[in-house]
Amino acid sequence: MSTDKLTCKQVARILSDGLDAQMPPAERTRLRLHMVVCEACRNVEQQFDLLRRLMRKAGPAERDDIPDDER
């Protein structure tokens, strides 16, 4: 386990890839600590959550109309 602080870029990648649920508890704690102090990353997390909910609601047929480079 690394004790280095996570950067906003690292946090955005973790959130984008949906990897936070797969992280070991200590790493997930580092992520959550960053989120407590970083409003920008909290906003990014909310945006990803909204996008995921909208994509689930849209269903597979509507997602097929979205070009791969825009997904």
Image (tube, helix red, strand yellow):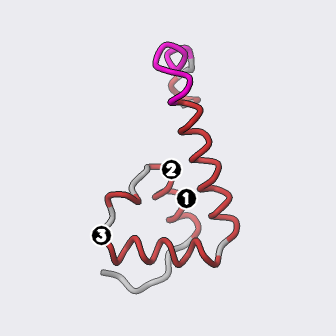
Q: Nearer the viewer, residue 62 or 3?
A: 62
Task: Please name which of the two marks, 3 or 1, marks the residue nearer to the observer.
Answer: 3
67 vs 47, nearest the viewer: 47
First-in-chain label (3 vs 1): 1
Q: Amino acid at mark 1?
A: Ala
Query: Type of residue at label 2?
Result: Ser
The label number, if any, that marks residue 24 in the structure image: 3
- Image quadrant occupied by the C terminus: top right
User: Which residue bears the numbered disc 1?
Assistant: 12
Spot occupied by residue 64 in the image (x, y as percentages of width and height): 49, 16
Front residue of 58 and 70: 58
Tell me if mark 3 has few (under 14), some (14-19) or many (20+) residues whose alpha carbon lies within 10 angstroms of its own: few
Residue located at (59% from left, 68% from top): 8
- Counting from the top left corner in percent of width and height, residue 12 is at 55, 58
Dominant secondary structure of the residues highlighted in magenta in the image: helix
* Label 2–label 1 contact, CB within 8 A: yes
The residue sitting at 59% across, 56% down in the picture is: 45
Task: Tell me which residue sits at (39%, 55%) in the image.
Answer: 19
Magenta-colored span: 56-65
Q: Which residue is rendered at x = 49% and y = 21% of the image? A: 59
Is 28 displayed left or right of 48 in the figure?
left
CA–CA distance in space, label 2 to label 1: 6 Å
Q: CA distance from mark 3 to mark 2?
A: 17 Å
Where residue 43 appears, x then y in whole percent? 68, 58
Q: Label 2: few (<14), some or many (≥20) within 10 Å?
A: some
Label 2: which residue? Answer: 16
In the rendering, at what x and y percent does residue 48 appear?
58, 47
Q: Three-letter amino acid code at disc 3?
A: Pro
Q: Is residue 63 magenta?
A: yes
